[in-house]
Image: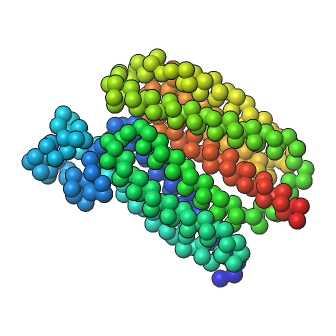
Amino acid sequence: MNDTDALKSYRRVAWITIAAVYFLILVGASVRASGAGMGCPDWPTCFGQWIPPLSEAGLPENYREIYAHRGYDEVPFNVVKTWTEYVNRLVGVVIGLLIMLTAWKSWSCRRHDPWIFRASLAAFFMVVYQGWLGSRVVASNLQPGMITVHMVMALAIVAVLLFALARARRDVVASQSVGQMDPQFRIWLYVLLGLTALQVVLGTQVREMVDYLNHTAGAERTTWVSALPWFFYVHRSLSALVLVAGLWLAWLAWRSVGPEHGLTRFSMAMVAVLVLAVSSGATLGHLGMPMLVQPTHLLTAALLFGLQFLIWMDYRHARQAELA
């Protein structure tokens, strides 16, 4: 297989893997929002079994005593929550296999760019570590700090995979000139990256506080917003600035290089995700934190991070190609 075919094959697999990782982020967020995080009180088994039971009759008679430290002395067995968490773990296994396939595909690209292979291999080892980290999340009885670390690691895996993909797309990017791009594009791209990073940090703090109100304080869902501290209001207000910056960045790309350019398309996709992120955030803030909207909001934040990272990488590679 020549380099061109190897890169095309790698890119196809990498796109599928990245999409699957985002799906896992959505599934994980849904597990957390539904309160199914401790549906399986141990790891990697579930109630000591590789396939969890379909009813309480399939559990040990003294399961309440065995898993009392996980809250089962008071909370009854819930088959829906157990299988929700179990499916989440199965999806994680599939993601691991996909990333293994991505690393294998990257081997044939190493002569073209060794960083494609290095990053893909790094992503594989990061997924192994993420699996272990998942066991620590369960062992901590879903401590908010551990959940945050688990989420940050998922974003790090996305970043490494996108880095490898962007390296594999350099020939595609080089075919589209950025010589006519408005110089403001670069400035606003960094402004947007900074604002989004701040939003993610603040959003993490909000989510940890929501976890505290839900699982520790036992507050009613409708009272969560009124109980949130100042950083929630900063997070909510800052979303308008992020949206304006994103719209301006997309307009600069559209005006400078046209709607068919790859950077314009990615920028427009980012704006669409931004609108969904802001609208879902507004829904959470004004309608009492509806459970079904929480996973959507978290997914849009992760997608924003990925799209902006890819725009940044493609823009850098396009400029380097023109300066070479």
Q: Is residue 146 left or right of residue 196?
A: left
Residue 90 vertical placement versus 218 (above, below):
below
Q: Residue at x 79, y 39 (%)?
A: 188
Instruction: Please identify the residue farthest to the bottom as the structure is shown.
Output: 1
Q: Residue at x 64, y 39 (%)?
A: 197
Where does residue 14 sit, x and y in percent of width and height? 59, 63
| Image-quadrant location for residue 290 | top left
Quadrant into which the C terminus falls: bottom right
| Image-quadrant location for residue 33 | top left
Quadrant into which the N terminus falls: bottom right
| Observer-nearest of 323 and 169 | 323
Please indicate, yes or no, whether residue 117 appears anywhere in the rendered image: yes
Where does residue 89 sit, x and y in percent of width and height? 36, 54
Specify how the rendered protein is coloured: rainbow
Q: Is residue 298 left or right of residue 10?
A: left
Q: Residue at x 41, y 18 (%)?
A: 223
Q: Is residue 119 left or right of residue 59?
A: right
| Image-quadrant location for residue 198 | top right
Residue 252 vertical placement versus 92 (above, below):
above
Instruction: Please identify the residue farthest to the left as the structure is shown.
Output: 61
| Observer-nearest of 279 and 18 | 18
Please indicate, yes or no, whether residue 277 appears anywhere in the rendered image: no
Where does residue 107 sit, x and y in percent of width and height? 60, 76
Where does residue 95 sit, x and y in percent of width and height? 46, 60
Q: How many marks?
A: 0
Q: Residue at x 69, y 38 (%)?
A: 194
